[in-house]
Image (spheres, grey):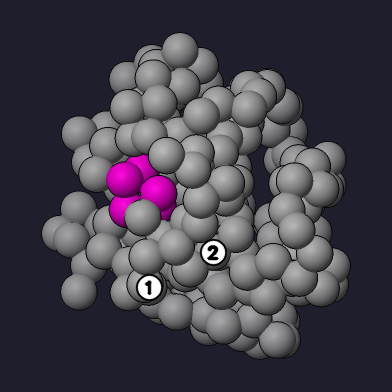
Amino acid sequence: MLRESLQLVAKTYDKIAKPYFNATFEKISQYHLDKFISMLPKKSKVLDAGCGPGRDSQYFKEYGLKVTAIDCSSKMIAEAKKKVKGVTFKKMDMMKMGFKDKTFDGVWASASIIHEDKKDLPNLLKEIRRVLKCNGILYVSAKEGKGSEIKRDEPYNNEPRQFFCYTVPELEDLLAQAGFAIVSSEFSEDRLGRDTKWIDIYCKKPTS
C-alpha cells in the first residue's frame, strides 16, 4: 500500500498518464543512460525506480539488461506495458520495495525522488541501498534549487505537481549519510526545454 503522501502523487500521474507518455517517451537522456550502462556488468539486473511510461526501461532492455520497473501510478504502468515489452512492471512504493536484499546490480532513479518529501528521503535512500548489491551503481537525478515548488505544465493538463529541489552538496550529503560513495556529480539541461537545471549523481554501494 502506498503512503498517504505518495497516494496524492499517484492520483495526479494517473490523471496525466497519456499526455505525459506522449510528451516524454521520445525524450531520452542518452548520455546518462549510456554512462550508467557502462558502469554495470553485462546482463545486469537493473531497477528503474519511478519508471513513468517506461522510456528508460525500454532502453535498458534493448541493451540486454534484465529490467524491473516500478512506479506509484497504475495508469503510468498501464501506458508503459502497451509500449515496452520484456520488462517486469510493478506498482510499488520506493520506500517499501518488495525485493530481497542485494537484488540489483544497478538502480536508476531518474527524476523520481523529486516528488518525495525531503524528510522521507533518508529512509528512501536506505531502502534503495538495501536492494542494491555491493559495488552496485545508483543513478539519481533531481531538480537543482532550494525548498519546493508547485508547478502546472500545459502539456499535462495544468495539473498541480509539487517538486522538491536540491543543491549538489545537499544531495551528496544525503547520499553519503545513506551509505553511498559518490562517483561523480554533473548538471544537465531540461530535455523538454524548460528553464530547469538537473543534478545527475552517480554513486556506488561500497562493499563494507
Say if residue 188 shows up in the picture: yes
Direction from residue 158 to residue 193 in the image, left or right: right
Res 28 label: none
Q: Main secondary structure of the magenta part?
A: helix
Q: Residue 62 placed where, x, y %?
A: 84, 72
Q: Which residues are magenta?
A: 125-129
Q: Which residue is mark 1?
A: 99
**On the rendered image, what quadrant is the C terminus found in?**
top left
195 is higher (above) or lower (below) than 50: above
Q: Position of residue 166 (x, y in %)?
A: 43, 22
**As displayed, is residue 60 above or below residue 124?**
below
Left or right: residue 201 versus residue 3 is right
Q: Circle 2 sits in a helix, a strand or a loop, which is it? A: strand
- SS for callout 1: loop
Towards the viewer: 71 or 105 = 105
Q: Amino acid at mark 2?
A: Phe
Residue 122, percent from left and from top: 27, 37
194 in the magenta segment: no
Seen in the picture, residue 84 relative to 27 is either above or below; the reply is below
Callout 1 touching callout 2 (CB < 8 Å): yes
User: For mark 1, does the 10 Å Cα neighbourhood hold few (<14), some (14 to 19), or many (20 or more) residues?
Assistant: few
Q: Please state if 45 lies on the left or on the right of 143 as rendered.
A: right
Residue drawn 75% across and 46% down? 39
